[in-house]
Image (spheres, grey):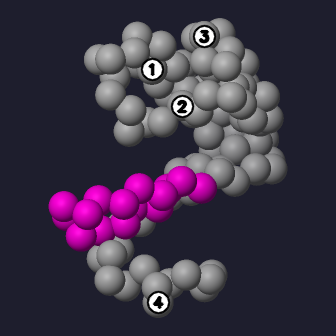
Amino acid sequence: NCMMPITQCFVDESIYDDLGIVVTAFVFAGADLEAQVTQALIDEGIDSPREEYKSSARMDSDPRMPAARNSLLNIAGRASKAVLTQAIPREQTRHWVGRC
């Protein structure tokens, strides 16, 4: 629905030491993503909150992880209103911390 208001913002950060950058992603949504994500993890056999899904986990060592990733990408594609990513050099991250 194009008229759905944005009610949630999720932020995730990935540090790429080998590239010397920090990537931050902001996902804006109007749906209750938290409940959908929790249910998707449970459906894939991940005992949330005792276990944590990590996108950086090896996908070939635990078959639950790629299944969870696919479920989460499906939710994000369906429910996200906007996604913004930024990559800044790691040495500049202290300059940006706490600023809007």
Report, in whole angstroms, how far the alpha carbon at label 2 lies from the one at label 1: 7 Å
Magenta segment: does it hold 22?
Answer: yes
SS for dot 3: loop
Q: Which residue matches tag 3?
A: 45
Left or right: residue 73 versus residue 39 is: left
Report, in whole angstroms, how far the alpha carbon at label 2 lies from the one at label 4: 30 Å
Q: Quadrant of the C terminus?
A: bottom right
Question: Do we see residue 34 in this rendering?
Answer: yes
Q: Quadrant of the N terminus?
A: top right
Q: Badge 4 local density, few (<14 within 10 Å), some, or many (20+)?
A: few
- Badge 2 or badge 4: first in the primary sequence: 2
Instruction: Check if mark 2's residue and mark 1's residue have beta carbons within 8 Å.
Output: yes
Q: Which residue matches tag 4?
A: 95
Q: Badge 1 local density, few (<14 within 10 Å), some, or many (20+)?
A: many
Q: Which residue matches tag 2?
A: 53
Magenta segment: does it hold 50?
Answer: no
Amino acid type of the residue that numbered disc 1 sits on in the rendered structure: Met
**Residue that appears at 30% across and 77% down:** 89
Q: Which residue matches tag 1?
A: 65
SS for dot 1: helix
- Badge 2 or badge 3: first in the primary sequence: 3
Residue 66, percent from left and from top: 41, 18
Q: Which residues are magenta?
A: 11-25
Residue 50, percent from left and from top: 68, 28
- Badge 1 or badge 3: first in the primary sequence: 3
Amino acid type of the residue that numbered disc 4 sits on in the rendered structure: His
Report, in whole angstroms, how far the alpha carbon at label 1 lies from the one at label 3: 9 Å
Question: Do we see residue 67 in this rendering?
Answer: no
